[in-house]
Image: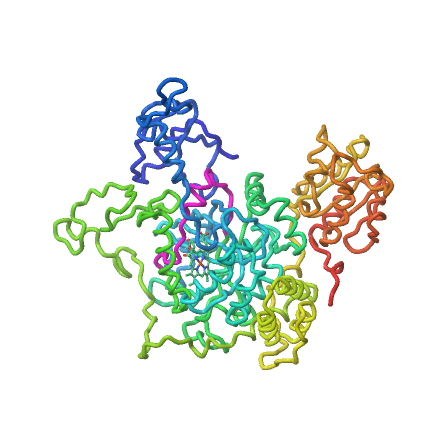
């Protein structure tokens, strides 16, 4: 941690502008000491709410010092007394500790950081956080899965939430996006249906955090608008290696509006600077059990170790007149704008450099709203976005139990709030102005109305127009092509990635009991690709269909493949180094290799039979899924000899299965000297990403060569194709 929890006095002065009701709260405030400078983006806003429990006495919630270890009884063995206000409040508070989990995206993790603008973008937007080169704005980003409950595992196959809040100097701006650039639906009216279909089935609440069940695929196959997002989710994008190794997208078309009222249509892209990387499905399944917190732990540890993840923020900028220019509708959230048509303009970057102090207060109480916008940003008429503008405020009121959710520390803008909104459960402010209405004369009209020309206010893009039209419950004919773009995605994946889509669909559909749903799903795939449909069909007992070629084409687009580029860095990747504790030379070699990997920023973990000097982790607590690559050092052959007796220290054959499984999951694997036994026992032959080196190879050489393997990340040639 960069800052520790001891007395800090300058803080009050720094926070003097914040006008917080707790500012003068005195001794019960937690004060923090900052050794050196604050991290970028940390304006100290949250510190005013932090409680420091160092060397204090327990009090009740109303401040009376008390004992809270034993309840008040009539004699030592006597009944507990109703009078015991300490017991009653403690139990009551406990009974009410939970708030409703999010209806969707319940499982998530978040961190703080800052956004930095690359330039003054006032030519295209009046958004103040984009108004100056180098301008920094605090951000908070919550990653999530969609379908699972709050306690579900991290590495399920799912769309991943990417909810980004900017605490700008003109109010909060939320881009509540996902890691997949399109959505399942085109109309908010269908959202409850989608979620009812995807969530566990209502009779038995099975399965948790999974779409491999009848209701989900019944919905998908009956609602072809889901096909594009589904294809992305079936590819590597559905099972990222970490939150840090995925991109984010705003999905809907939004508007940038400049001070002159000129507007552009924009689509947001958040490109990971860590590189895209994904798991393979078999390892994701094992990870669910080995470490259900895999993603949140990865994020937390990376930030704790100073490896701050970064994303470049880019926009595709389009003219108002481009809405129907490319044969699809920019209001349709099931469509991407291929980068070949409109390149991405990088406008800034953000860095996550600070973990939360308290999961509930920050991550759980973060309440994002697509309607949190600032001057210079505007919506589009995308019907899904329009519905979201209602839904999020409504759900936050439900979660918080009242309308004052924006007053919670994590949700507060870092600028003063002035309006005539009043009262409600949990009002945290003391509105002093008794003239709580507009228009008034008694307070000189204040709070005054701000708009495009007065008070630097928010305004809608003047170019937005409503055409003369009938009231209809209908869908635009410009929304009706559901298959061209899923095919574009499929065409643009590497053959091995196409195979992953095939395999994922085979897995999911093999769990569908209804033959009709399986057939309907194949019929949808067949509109995308006959090859895809036939390959899936042959595994799930459905007849191979004839081509349904209306939407077939050979176009491709770039930037959608996970595995086509090597990772830019191996920093934070985890390298398992297998040793035998009976061989001190093997431990010494492992330590030298570990030191070489540490130099490169990777996280080496030395695995042995028991915890002792030089050993980080036991075989019993290790599994191939926990590592991005495996190296077995010289002098470990006893761990792999087929004749060797099982050890009581780890499950049978665990060292061998770590090597075998790492190979099967496509990871780089290496053996040194006599450790070749680890490959022999598993019938692993030398090939790409399989390293065999003699016992004298220097630790540095081993780390250098293995680095390339780690950057390749997955050796796709190992996976069967059909
Ligand atoms: Fe959401 N969505 N959503 N969603 N969504 C929620 O709001 C909803 C949609 C997304 O980390 C809920 O605070 C409707 C698209 C993220 O706290 C809820 C529709 C996209 C998060 C809700 C959509 C998203 C949510 C549940 C269709 C990508 C997690 C709890 C009109 C652009 C935010 C909450 C966080 C959360 C409703 C569609 C992303 C119920 C009605 C499209 C990342 O309000």
Residue 88, quarter of picture: top left
**Residue stretch in magenta:** 350-376
Residue at image coords 52%, 34%: 1
Snapshot quadrant of residue 493: bottom right
Residue at 64% in and 80% down: 547
| Quarter of the image with the C terminus in it | bottom right
388 relative to 349 in the view: left or right: left
x and y percentages locating residue 185 in the rendered image: 47, 67
Magenta stretch: includes residue 358? yes
Instruction: Compare residues 76 and 315 and report the one nearer the observer.
Output: 76
View extreme (bottom): residue: 550
Question: Is residue 487 among what the camera can see?
Answer: no
Quadrant position of ligand 1: bottom left
**Residue at 62% of width from left, 69% of height from top?**
490
Tell me which corner region of the image, top left, top right, bottom left or bottom right, holds residue 239: bottom right
Residue at the front extreme? Answer: 78
* Residue at 24% from the left image edge and 41% from the top image edge: 430
């Amino acid at each position: 941690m960069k800052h520790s929890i001891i007395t800090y006095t300058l803080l009050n002065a720094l926070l003097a502008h914040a006008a917080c009701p707790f500012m003068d709260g005195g001794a019960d405030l937690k004060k923090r000491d900052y050794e050196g400078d604050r991290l970028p983006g940390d304006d100290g806003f949250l510190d005013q709410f932090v409680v420091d429990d160092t060397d204090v006495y327990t009090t009740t919630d109303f401040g009376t010092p008390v004992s809270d270890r034993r309840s008040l009884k009539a004699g030592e063995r006597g009944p507990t007394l109703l009078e015991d206000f300490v017991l009653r409040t403690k139990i009551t508070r406990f009974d009410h500790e939970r708030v409703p989990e999010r209806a969707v995206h319940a499982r998530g993790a978040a961190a703080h950081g800052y956004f930095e603008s690359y330039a003054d973008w006032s030519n295209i937007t009046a958004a103040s956080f984009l108004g100056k080169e180098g301008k920094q704005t605090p951000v908070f980003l919550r990653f999530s899965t969609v379908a699972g409950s709050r306690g579900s595992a991290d590495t399920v196959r799912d769309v991943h939430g990417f909810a980004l809040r900017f605490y700008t100097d003109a109010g909060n701006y939320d881009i509540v996006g996902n890691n997949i650039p399109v959505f399942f639906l085109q109309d908010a009216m269908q959202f409850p249906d989608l979620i009812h279909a995807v969530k566990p089935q209502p009779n038995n609440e099975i399965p948790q955090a999974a779409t491999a069940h009848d209701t989900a695929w019944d919905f998908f196959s009956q609602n072809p608008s889901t096909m594009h997002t589904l294809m992305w989710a079936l590819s590597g994008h559905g099972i990222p290696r970490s939150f840090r190794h995925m991109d984010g997208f705003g999905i809907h078309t939004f508007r940038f509006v400049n001070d002159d009222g000129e507007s552009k249509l924009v689509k947001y892209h958040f490109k990971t600077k860590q590189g895209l990387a994904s798991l393979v499905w078999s390892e994701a399944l094992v990870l669910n059990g080995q470490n259900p917190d895999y993603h949140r732990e990865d994020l937390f540890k990376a930030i704790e170790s100073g490896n701050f993840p970064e994303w470049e923020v880019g926009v595709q900028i389009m003219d108002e007149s481009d809405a129907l220019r490319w044969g699809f509708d920019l209001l349709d959230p099931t469509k991407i704008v291929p980068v070949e048509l409109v390149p991405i303009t990088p406008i800034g970057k953000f860095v996550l450099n600070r973990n939360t102090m308290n999961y509930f207060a920050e991550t759980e109480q973060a309440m994002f709203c697509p309607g949190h916008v600032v001057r210079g940003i505007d919506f589009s008429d995308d019907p899904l976005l329009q519905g979201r503008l209602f839904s999020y405020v409504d759900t936050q009121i439900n979660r918080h139990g009242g309308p004052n959710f924006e007053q919670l520390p994590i949700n507060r803008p870092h600028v003063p709030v002035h309006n005539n909104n009043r009262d409600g459960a949990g009002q945290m402010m003391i509105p002093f102005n008794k003239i709580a209405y507009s228009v008034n004369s008694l307070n000189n009209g204040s709070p005054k109305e701000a708009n495009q020309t007065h008070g630097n206010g928010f305004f809608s893009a003047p170019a937005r127009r409503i055409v003369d039209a009938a009231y209809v419950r209908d869908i635009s004919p410009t929304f009706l092509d559901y298959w061209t773009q899923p095919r574009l995605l499929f065409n643009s994946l590497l053959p091995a990635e196409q195979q992953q889509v095939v395999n994922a669909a085979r897995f999911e559909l093999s769990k569908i009991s209804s033959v009709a749903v399986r057939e309907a799903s194949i019929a949808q795939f067949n509109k995308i690709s006959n090859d895809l449909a036939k390959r899936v069909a042959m595994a799930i007992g459905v007849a191979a269909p004839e081509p349904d070629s209306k939407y077939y084409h050979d176009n491709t687009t770039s930037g959608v493949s996970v595995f086509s580029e090597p990772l830019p860095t191996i920093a934070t990747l985890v390298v398992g180094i297998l040793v035998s504790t009976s061989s001190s030379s093997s431990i010494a070699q492992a330590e030298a290799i570990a030191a070489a990997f540490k130099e490169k920023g990777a996280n080496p973990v030395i695995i042995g039979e028991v915890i002792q000097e030089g050993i980080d982790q036991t075989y019993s607590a290790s599994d191939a899924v926990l590592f991005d690559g495996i190296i077995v050092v010289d002098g470990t052959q006893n761990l792999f000899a087929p004749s060797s007796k099982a050890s009581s220290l780890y499950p049978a054959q665990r060292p061998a299965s770590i090597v075998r499984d790492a190979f099967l999951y496509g990871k780089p694997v290496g053996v040194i000297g006599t450790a070749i036994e680890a490959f022999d026992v598993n019938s692993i032959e030398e090939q790409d990403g399989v390293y065999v080196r003699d016992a004298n190879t220097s630790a540095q050489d081993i780390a250098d060569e293995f680095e390339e393997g780690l950057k390749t990340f997955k050796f796709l040639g190992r996976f069967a194709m059909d």
